[in-house]
Amino acid sequence: MLVATWNVNSLRVRLPQLLDWLGRVSPDIVGLQETKVVDEDFPRAELAQAGYHAVFTGQRTYNGVALLSRAPASAPLLALPGRPPDEQKRFVAASFGALHVVNAYVPNGSAVGSDKYAYKLDWLADFRRYLERALAQLPKVLVMGDFNIAPADIDVHDPAAWQGQVLVSDAERAALAEIAALGLHDTFRHLNPDAQAFTWWDYRAAGFRRNHGLRIDHILASAPVLAACRACRVELDVRRAERPSDHAPLLVELEDGVTD
Protein backbone atom coordinates (compact mmCIF):
# COMPACT_ATOMS: atom_id res chain seq x y z
CA MET A 1 0.00 0.00 0.00
CA LEU A 2 1.38 3.41 -1.00
CA VAL A 3 0.50 6.67 0.76
CA ALA A 4 1.86 10.05 -0.31
CA THR A 5 1.77 13.73 0.54
CA TRP A 6 2.39 16.50 -2.00
CA ASN A 7 2.12 20.26 -1.88
CA VAL A 8 1.14 20.86 -5.51
CA ASN A 9 1.21 24.68 -5.28
CA SER A 10 -1.85 25.14 -7.56
CA LEU A 11 -3.89 22.20 -8.75
CA ARG A 12 -4.85 24.12 -11.90
CA VAL A 13 -1.22 24.35 -12.95
CA ARG A 14 -0.10 20.96 -11.70
CA LEU A 15 -3.08 18.76 -12.71
CA PRO A 16 -1.35 17.23 -15.78
CA GLN A 17 1.69 16.39 -13.63
CA LEU A 18 -0.52 14.97 -10.91
CA LEU A 19 -2.46 12.76 -13.33
CA ASP A 20 0.76 11.54 -14.93
CA TRP A 21 2.29 10.76 -11.54
CA LEU A 22 -0.85 8.97 -10.32
CA GLY A 23 -0.81 6.86 -13.46
CA ARG A 24 2.86 5.92 -13.06
CA VAL A 25 3.05 5.37 -9.29
CA SER A 26 -0.56 4.39 -8.49
CA PRO A 27 -0.59 5.42 -4.81
CA ASP A 28 -3.56 4.27 -2.75
CA ILE A 29 -3.98 7.49 -0.74
CA VAL A 30 -2.60 10.95 -1.51
CA GLY A 31 -2.81 14.12 0.55
CA LEU A 32 -2.57 17.34 -1.49
CA GLN A 33 -1.88 20.80 -0.12
CA GLU A 34 -2.11 24.28 -1.65
CA THR A 35 -4.68 23.19 -4.21
CA LYS A 36 -5.76 26.85 -4.54
CA VAL A 37 -9.16 26.08 -6.08
CA VAL A 38 -12.68 26.63 -4.78
CA ASP A 39 -14.72 23.47 -4.39
CA GLU A 40 -16.80 24.12 -7.53
CA ASP A 41 -13.62 24.09 -9.63
CA PHE A 42 -12.02 21.02 -8.07
CA PRO A 43 -11.18 18.52 -10.89
CA ARG A 44 -13.35 15.76 -9.50
CA ALA A 45 -14.19 14.29 -12.94
CA GLU A 46 -10.58 14.10 -14.13
CA LEU A 47 -9.49 12.41 -10.92
CA ALA A 48 -12.42 9.99 -11.01
CA GLN A 49 -11.42 9.04 -14.55
CA ALA A 50 -7.95 8.31 -13.19
CA GLY A 51 -9.51 6.02 -10.58
CA TYR A 52 -9.56 8.27 -7.52
CA HIS A 53 -12.19 9.38 -5.06
CA ALA A 54 -11.64 12.81 -3.52
CA VAL A 55 -12.47 14.58 -0.28
CA PHE A 56 -11.51 18.25 -0.48
CA THR A 57 -11.96 21.76 0.81
CA GLY A 58 -10.52 24.79 -0.92
CA GLN A 59 -10.44 28.49 -1.49
CA ARG A 60 -9.40 30.73 -4.34
CA THR A 61 -5.70 31.64 -4.70
CA TYR A 62 -4.60 30.35 -1.29
CA ASN A 63 -4.43 27.14 0.77
CA GLY A 64 -6.78 24.22 -0.02
CA VAL A 65 -6.32 20.54 0.83
CA ALA A 66 -7.57 17.23 -0.54
CA LEU A 67 -7.42 13.51 0.12
CA LEU A 68 -7.39 11.30 -2.97
CA SER A 69 -7.94 7.57 -2.60
CA ARG A 70 -8.52 4.40 -4.59
CA ALA A 71 -11.16 3.29 -2.07
CA PRO A 72 -13.85 5.67 -0.85
CA ALA A 73 -13.25 7.46 2.42
CA SER A 74 -15.57 7.41 5.40
CA ALA A 75 -16.34 10.01 8.09
CA PRO A 76 -14.66 12.94 6.29
CA LEU A 77 -13.80 16.00 8.36
CA LEU A 78 -13.21 19.26 6.46
CA ALA A 79 -12.13 21.64 9.21
CA LEU A 80 -9.86 21.47 12.21
CA PRO A 81 -12.05 21.24 15.32
CA GLY A 82 -11.71 24.27 17.51
CA ARG A 83 -11.00 26.67 14.65
CA PRO A 84 -13.55 29.09 13.10
CA PRO A 85 -15.54 27.31 10.37
CA ASP A 86 -14.88 30.00 7.74
CA GLU A 87 -11.15 30.05 8.36
CA GLN A 88 -8.33 29.15 5.97
CA LYS A 89 -8.73 25.73 4.31
CA ARG A 90 -5.83 23.79 5.78
CA PHE A 91 -7.20 20.53 7.17
CA VAL A 92 -8.97 17.41 5.95
CA ALA A 93 -9.24 13.99 7.58
CA ALA A 94 -11.02 10.74 6.80
CA SER A 95 -10.93 7.05 7.61
CA PHE A 96 -10.08 4.15 5.34
CA GLY A 97 -11.15 1.08 7.23
CA ALA A 98 -9.25 1.11 10.51
CA LEU A 99 -6.73 3.69 9.25
CA HIS A 100 -7.46 7.32 10.16
CA VAL A 101 -5.66 9.70 7.79
CA VAL A 102 -5.10 13.39 8.50
CA ASN A 103 -3.83 15.81 5.87
CA ALA A 104 -2.68 19.28 6.94
CA TYR A 105 -1.22 22.39 5.39
CA VAL A 106 0.37 24.11 8.37
CA PRO A 107 0.67 27.92 8.08
CA ASN A 108 4.04 29.18 6.88
CA GLY A 109 4.46 31.77 9.61
CA SER A 110 6.03 34.45 7.37
CA ALA A 111 8.66 35.69 9.87
CA VAL A 112 9.56 34.97 13.48
CA GLY A 113 7.72 37.40 15.75
CA SER A 114 5.07 38.35 13.19
CA ASP A 115 1.31 38.02 13.59
CA LYS A 116 1.41 35.17 11.08
CA TYR A 117 4.04 33.41 13.17
CA ALA A 118 1.82 33.67 16.26
CA TYR A 119 -1.09 32.35 14.18
CA LYS A 120 1.04 29.37 13.12
CA LEU A 121 1.91 28.43 16.69
CA ASP A 122 -1.73 28.84 17.74
CA TRP A 123 -2.88 26.65 14.84
CA LEU A 124 -0.32 23.98 15.75
CA ALA A 125 -1.57 23.98 19.35
CA ASP A 126 -5.13 23.29 18.15
CA PHE A 127 -3.82 20.66 15.76
CA ARG A 128 -2.01 18.90 18.60
CA ARG A 129 -5.18 18.92 20.72
CA TYR A 130 -7.14 17.34 17.88
CA LEU A 131 -4.50 14.64 17.34
CA GLU A 132 -4.38 13.89 21.07
CA ARG A 133 -8.11 13.17 21.02
CA ALA A 134 -7.88 11.14 17.82
CA LEU A 135 -5.04 8.99 19.15
CA ALA A 136 -6.97 8.32 22.36
CA GLN A 137 -9.75 6.74 20.30
CA LEU A 138 -8.02 5.33 17.22
CA PRO A 139 -4.89 3.15 17.29
CA LYS A 140 -4.04 3.48 13.58
CA VAL A 141 -3.40 7.12 12.67
CA LEU A 142 -1.38 8.57 9.81
CA VAL A 143 -0.74 12.32 9.76
CA MET A 144 0.74 13.90 6.67
CA GLY A 145 1.18 17.18 4.92
CA ASP A 146 3.26 20.28 4.50
CA PHE A 147 4.19 21.13 8.08
CA ASN A 148 6.39 24.09 7.13
CA ILE A 149 8.85 22.93 9.82
CA ALA A 150 12.24 21.29 9.37
CA PRO A 151 12.58 19.12 12.50
CA ALA A 152 16.38 19.16 12.86
CA ASP A 153 19.53 20.61 11.33
CA ILE A 154 20.01 17.50 9.16
CA ASP A 155 16.80 18.55 7.42
CA VAL A 156 18.26 21.92 6.36
CA HIS A 157 20.82 22.44 3.59
CA ASP A 158 22.62 25.21 5.53
CA PRO A 159 21.66 25.26 9.22
CA ALA A 160 23.87 28.24 9.99
CA ALA A 161 22.25 30.39 7.30
CA TRP A 162 18.76 29.40 8.44
CA GLN A 163 19.36 29.66 12.18
CA GLY A 164 16.52 31.43 13.98
CA GLN A 165 14.41 31.86 10.85
CA VAL A 166 10.84 30.76 10.25
CA LEU A 167 10.54 27.04 9.40
CA VAL A 168 13.46 26.15 11.70
CA SER A 169 12.90 28.29 14.80
CA ASP A 170 13.00 26.73 18.25
CA ALA A 171 9.32 27.37 18.94
CA GLU A 172 8.21 25.71 15.70
CA ARG A 173 10.43 22.71 16.28
CA ALA A 174 9.15 22.43 19.84
CA ALA A 175 5.55 22.48 18.58
CA LEU A 176 6.31 19.65 16.15
CA ALA A 177 8.11 17.72 18.90
CA GLU A 178 5.02 18.05 21.12
CA ILE A 179 2.93 16.52 18.32
CA ALA A 180 5.42 13.68 17.95
CA ALA A 181 5.36 13.12 21.71
CA LEU A 182 1.71 12.12 21.43
CA GLY A 183 2.92 8.87 19.87
CA LEU A 184 3.48 9.89 16.25
CA HIS A 185 6.67 8.88 14.50
CA ASP A 186 8.46 10.51 11.56
CA THR A 187 8.36 7.71 8.98
CA PHE A 188 11.13 9.12 6.80
CA ARG A 189 13.57 9.59 9.67
CA HIS A 190 12.63 6.21 11.18
CA LEU A 191 13.43 4.41 7.94
CA ASN A 192 16.32 6.64 6.86
CA PRO A 193 18.03 7.58 10.14
CA ASP A 194 21.15 9.17 8.67
CA ALA A 195 19.94 10.38 5.28
CA GLN A 196 19.77 14.03 4.35
CA ALA A 197 16.87 14.59 1.98
CA PHE A 198 14.69 17.57 1.21
CA THR A 199 11.09 17.99 0.03
CA TRP A 200 11.09 21.73 -0.73
CA TRP A 201 13.47 23.94 -2.69
CA ASP A 202 13.07 27.66 -3.30
CA TYR A 203 12.34 28.59 -6.91
CA ARG A 204 14.86 31.40 -6.55
CA ALA A 205 18.64 31.13 -6.92
CA ALA A 206 18.46 27.69 -8.59
CA GLY A 207 17.54 26.13 -5.26
CA PHE A 208 16.69 22.71 -6.65
CA ARG A 209 19.67 22.47 -9.00
CA ARG A 210 21.97 23.38 -6.10
CA ASN A 211 20.02 21.13 -3.70
CA HIS A 212 19.44 24.03 -1.32
CA GLY A 213 16.33 22.60 0.31
CA LEU A 214 14.48 21.79 3.48
CA ARG A 215 12.59 18.69 4.62
CA ILE A 216 9.29 20.26 5.67
CA ASP A 217 6.78 17.72 4.30
CA HIS A 218 6.20 14.79 6.64
CA ILE A 219 4.26 11.57 7.13
CA LEU A 220 3.85 10.74 10.82
CA ALA A 221 2.53 7.37 11.99
CA SER A 222 1.19 5.97 15.23
CA ALA A 223 3.03 2.89 16.51
CA PRO A 224 0.77 0.24 14.86
CA VAL A 225 1.12 2.02 11.50
CA LEU A 226 4.86 2.55 11.94
CA ALA A 227 5.23 -1.21 12.35
CA ALA A 228 3.74 -1.61 8.88
CA CYS A 229 6.11 0.90 7.22
CA ARG A 230 8.56 -0.63 4.78
CA ALA A 231 10.06 2.32 2.86
CA CYS A 232 9.81 6.09 2.60
CA ARG A 233 11.25 8.23 -0.17
CA VAL A 234 11.06 11.62 -1.88
CA GLU A 235 9.83 11.52 -5.49
CA LEU A 236 12.49 13.76 -6.98
CA ASP A 237 11.53 13.18 -10.61
CA VAL A 238 8.36 15.20 -10.11
CA ARG A 239 10.41 18.21 -9.00
CA ARG A 240 12.46 17.94 -12.21
CA ALA A 241 9.37 18.35 -14.41
CA GLU A 242 8.64 21.46 -16.45
CA ARG A 243 6.85 24.11 -14.35
CA PRO A 244 7.05 22.01 -11.17
CA SER A 245 5.73 22.70 -7.71
CA ASP A 246 8.44 23.87 -5.35
CA HIS A 247 7.72 20.68 -3.34
CA ALA A 248 8.27 17.04 -4.28
CA PRO A 249 5.93 14.25 -3.13
CA LEU A 250 6.89 12.16 -0.12
CA LEU A 251 5.84 8.52 -0.44
CA VAL A 252 5.62 5.81 2.20
CA GLU A 253 5.14 2.10 1.52
CA LEU A 254 2.98 0.22 4.04
CA GLU A 255 2.24 -3.45 4.41
CA ASP A 256 -1.08 -4.58 3.01
CA GLY A 257 -3.67 -5.00 5.73
CA VAL A 258 -2.89 -1.76 7.57
CA THR A 259 -6.49 -0.65 7.01
CA ASP A 260 -7.89 -3.82 8.65
Image (tube, helix red, strand yellow):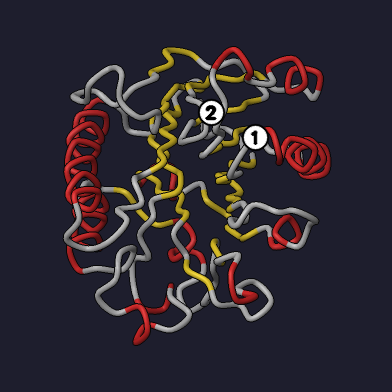
Toward which corner of the image does residue 53 lie, by quadrant?
Answer: top right
For disc 2, the marked residue is 66
Q: Amino acid at mark 2?
A: Ala
Q: Is residue 63 above or below residue 247?
A: above
User: Is there a contact, CB below 8 Å, between mark 1 and mark 2?
Assistant: yes
Residue at 30% across, 64% down: 166
As measured in the structure, the alpha-carbon distance from the residue carrying label 1 to the one carrying label 2 is: 10 Å
Give above or below for 150 relative to 146. Answer: below
135 lies left or right of 63? left
Residue shown at 47%/68% (left/top)? 214
User: Which of pointers 1 and 2 indicates the residue nearer the eye?
Assistant: 1
Q: Where, by quadrant of the figure, is residue 47 drawn?
A: top right
Q: Is residue 84 above or below residue 198?
A: above
State left or right for residue 49 relative to residue 197.
Answer: right
> Which residue is label 1 attached to?
11
Please tell me whether mark 1 sits on a helix, a strand or a loop: helix
Q: Residue at x 21, y 46 (%)?
A: 182
Compare residues 177 and 96 and report the one nearer the observer. 177
Q: Foreground residue, 34 or 53? A: 34
Residue pictured at 44% horizontal, 31% vertical: 101
The residue tagged with tag 2: helix, strand or loop?
A: strand
Q: Earlier in the sequence, mark 1 or mark 2?
A: 1
Badge 1: residue crowd in 10 Å (few <14, some 14–19, many ≥20): many
Which quarter of the figure is the N terminus placed in? top right
Q: Residue 22 appears at what percent x and percent y?
A: 76, 38
How far from the left and from the top, in percent, is residue 174?
Answer: 19, 61
Q: Position of residue 45 (x, y in %)?
A: 75, 15
Is 135 or 19 nearer to us in this picture?
19
Q: Position of residue 2 (x, y in %)?
A: 64, 42
Under mark 1, the amino acid is: Leu
